[in-house]
Amino acid sequence: MSSLYLLSAPAPCLPSRASQLPRRPSPRTLAPRAETTSPGVPRAPGRVHWGWARGDRRALHRGKPPGAGHTGSSMENGRPPDPADWAVMDVVNYFRMAGFEEQASAFQEQEIDGKSLLLMTRNDVLTGLQLKLGPALKIYEYHVKPLQTKHLKHNSS
């Protein structure tokens, strides 16, 4: 019965977790971002940008790399529109354009082409590529998973 009490209410003599958290953001969270909003699009000189550009964040959550849009041609950004047809360098360039410069090299080292990318599970991305957890989660949730869904919808019709 006492264990139920411990789960439902904190002990009155212990400080709350919120009081232990730092009040100031760490220097890492306030580090200025590179002087570009998207790959290849320079910023105005002398401007410092803190964090994501608004359009880049929206593009990332749609599963597209920042700065990428549909070109309407048979080749999107120099690679075939169907990820199953991508070569290893197409996959690497996709992730570089998405802002994952360091992580893109893992795809090249493991020789992951478009077909392999479409077969990857969440566990493959999180552990098999030996990436940091945060970038690996973003890569899977916002890029690999949407590419898989798009490919399945395209090929099922």
Image (cartoon, helix red, strand yellow):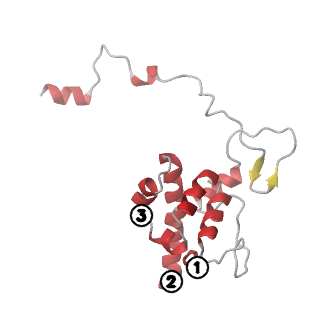
Of the two numbered discs 1 and 2 in the rendering, the one whose residue sits closer to the viewer: 1
Q: Identify whether 155 is placed above or below 12.
A: below
Q: Amino acid at mark 2?
A: Asn
Q: Which circle marks residue 121 in the picture?
A: 3
Residue hosting label 2: 155
Taking depth in this image into account, of 106 and 43 the one nearest to the observer is 106
How far apart are the two marked residues, 1 and 2, measured between alpha carbons? 13 Å
Q: Identify whether 57 is placed above or below 22.
A: below
Taking depth in this image into account, of 105 and 150 the one nearest to the observer is 105
Local packing at callout 3 (Cα closer than 10 Å; few below 14, some 14-19, many 20+) is few
Relative horizontal placement of residue 41, taking residue 26 as reference (left or right):
right
Residue sitting at x 70%, y 64%: 68
The answer to whether residue 44 is seen in the rendering is yes
Horizontal and vertical percent position of residue 36: 77, 49
Horizontal and vertical percent position of residue 26: 59, 28
Relative horizontal placement of residue 78, taking residue 134 as reference (left or right):
right
Of the two numbered discs 2 and 3 in the rendering, the one whose residue sits closer to the viewer: 3
Taking depth in this image into account, of 111 and 22 the one nearest to the observer is 111
Which element is circle 3 on? loop
Q: Amino acid at mark 3?
A: Thr
Horizontal and vertical percent position of residue 74: 70, 82
Question: Farthest residue in the front direction?
Answer: 109
Q: Amino acid at mark 1?
A: Asp
Which element is circle 1 on? helix
Residue hosting label 1: 85
Residue sitting at x 37%, y 17%: 15
